[in-house]
Every structure is written in C-alpha cells, then in structure tokens.
Image (cartoon, grey):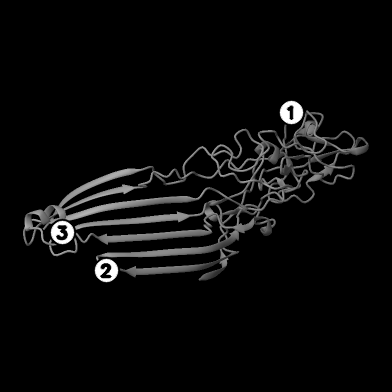
Amino acid sequence: MGNKGTHVFADGEGTYYLLSQASLQHLIVPVQGHDYSNCKGGQNGAIPGNDGQQFCLTPFQLRSFYPKVEIPQDPCAPKKCYFDPNLFKILYFGNNANDNYNSLQVKLHKSFNRGYSFMAHYTWSKGLDYDSNFFAVDPGVGYGPASFDIRHRFVMTNIWDLPIGRGKAWLGGIGPTADRFLGGWTIGAITIWQSGLPFTPSYLPGDCAADTDSGDPCRPNRVGSVQVSGTREQYFSTTGGAPLLGSDCVAKSNVCGVDGNGQPVPGPVTGPWQRPGAGQIGNVGRDSFTGPGFFQTDIGLAKAVPISERVALRFRADAFNAFNKVNLGNPNPCVDCTGGGSISSLAAGVLQRTLQFSLRIEF
C-alpha cells in the first residue's frame, strides 16, 4: 500500500517555510584592505586565509528580502554601521512540496474454540518528504524520512472468554451461586512494538550559526562509522563533548575554515564527525538516524455478574504497560555538546505501569 502526494505542504513546524531564508551563495567575501564594515561581527568576524588574506561572512548578501539599512546616527564612526533587523520576514504557507509513502501491510485474524481469538497487524513502511527549513533555497537539502516515519510496527490483540463456569469446559458442573464468582471472566491484551522515530545529528548551535549565519540547517560531516549502542547514557557515537573545530580557527572567532581563495575547508576529524567549512552544510542526511523503539503491553481482566434478568454488575481491572517497559525518547542530537547523544526523557505520551479498576451496574 502506498500513496504519492503532489503539491502538499513541507514537513515542518506550522508547515511554513521562509522565503527570505539565508542562501549560502556568496556567503564568504574577501576583506578589502582593513574595511570590516560588511563583516558579520566586524573585525572579530574575520576569517584567516593563506598568505595573510582575510575573509568574512557577510549577512547582507544572504537575504534578498532583508535590505542593508544604514543607521542615521552612526555610533561606529568613522566606519559605517548597519542595522540588520529581520525586516520583511516572509513566511510562506505553500503547498508546493511532494511526499510519498510505501508499505507492506500484513494482517492475520484467527478464532479458536473455547473462546480465544487474536488479530495481528504488521507494517513495514517508509515515508519521505521535504523539510520546510531551507526549502525556498534548496529543497533537496531537506529531503529525507518524514518526522513521523516508523519503519516497523507490529500490533497484536488477544481476547479470551475463559471457558470456566457453568456449562463451560472447565468446572461446567458447578452451581449457580459458585458460577457467579468463577464463571464469566474475560481476559484481553494488546501489544504494540515499533521502531523508533528519526532524528538528525547537529553540532554546537553557536558554531553552526557562525558557519551559516543562521544555524539552519545545522548538520556536521559524517566521516566515519557511527556506532548506535542504544543506551540512554550514550545512544550513538559523539565527540565525547570535545567541540568540533574548524580549519584555521583562531581564538578571537569561531568562524573559520577557508583557504587563500576563500574556498571552504572543513575542520579536523573528531571521532566520526567533522565540522563543515564556512558556508557549508554537513553531509549527514536529514532524519538519517533512528531513536529508541517502543514496546508496550496492556492487559485487561473483566467479569460480568448477573444480578437479575435486567441488571448486571460488571467488574474490570486494567494494567497499562503491564511489564513496566521504559520507553525512551530520542537522544540529544548534538554530536559535540556536553551531554550529546544521551537520553534524558521518556518518549512523548508514554507512561509507566498504571493500574485501573472499575465497577459499574448495568441495567
């Protein structure tokens, strides 16, 4: 089973995307003489290149809808100062993206004698769509598994009217009084097992914002094998908290990584990760990693006690997450942050073992 969506919304918060989002084209410009007026961060934003050359990131060539505005009363004299408010920020609610979903779905239903039946579903699927982030500039950057993509999902329900009591296979000869207590029990269970939700590795937000002027998309280069241990302390391989350095970094600036011609140069490798060069988006794909899976079994026990022809007393006991399985949320995706790769929360909407009892009269 599958479907194809054409002219649909991009997958993102509110499904809006930013028409005026920064493009990385012409991000790196040479410093002419000692004029740092167009450098993001002024002189402290300069990037050292070879042969004594300097380059910088300019925020003014990035946003076609964000004009360069000169401050009338220049506080930076004799240099000109520019104000870069998010003027003319345009959020576009546009249905010009595509998506697709393909799946193999299997269903098995069987009823047995003595009151037992079960139904099992299995789905193997893959959903792909576009992220709204950077969509207006380069849609391909955000193409990947959908944020709700669950590759495997298995659901099984069981219902058993216990063959106990008057006229049943077990204790069929008991009297009416004993049957009120021993007969009429039903046990049911539902079990859900599914693989985890996807996530995208990132690196230190401040460094990422310095490299791209906006911090989105924020992806490192994956240059080695990443081990997924699945533990809550270290779910996947990171740098162990060591920041990803850029090429030719200097103490006064965390913007780094160009050669003598102003071409981006990625930083040194730390573990399986690498910081991209200035103005580059890392090669790790969107939603290319999968978080912890989910498992839960709910069990219910019910009994109806007839009081008269028109009145019955019904008792029910439910155990939600009966085996008390801890279902973890996704890890911290930052590969070079303190605590990166660790899991500090449960999955959304899950609960630990919960017991519920009810008693009602039906008439």
Query: Does dot 1 land on a helix, a strand or a loop?
Result: loop
From the top left corner, tell me how far across and down residue 347 is, in percent.
Answer: 47, 45
Query: Does dot 3 land on a helix, a strand or a loop?
Result: loop
Q: Which residue is mark 1?
A: 75
Q: CA distance from mark 1 to mark 3?
A: 95 Å
Mark 2 and mark 3 lie on one chain; the one further toward the N terminus is 2
Mark 1 and mark 2 lie on one chain; the one further toward the N terminus is 1
Frontmost of labels 1 and 3 is: 3
Quadrant hosting residue 253: top right
From the top left corner, tell me how far across and down residue 84 is, in percent.
Answer: 69, 40
Q: Is residue 26 visible?
A: yes
Q: Which mark is residue 113?
A: 2
Q: Amino acid at mark 3?
A: Leu
Q: Which residue is mark 3?
A: 171
Q: CA distance from mark 1 to mark 2?
A: 88 Å
Structural crowding at the residue carrying mark 3, measured as other residues with C-alpha within 10 Å and reported as few (<14), some (14–19) or many (≥20): some
| Labels 1 & 2 near each other (Cβ < 8 A) | no
Q: Is residue 223 left or right of residue 294?
A: right
Q: Is residue 42 left or right of residue 292?
A: right
Residue at the extreme right: 51
Q: Is residue 317 left or right of residue 260?
A: left
Residue closer to the observer: 99 or 114: 114
Frontmost of labels 2 and 3 is: 3
Q: Amino acid at mark 2?
A: Asn
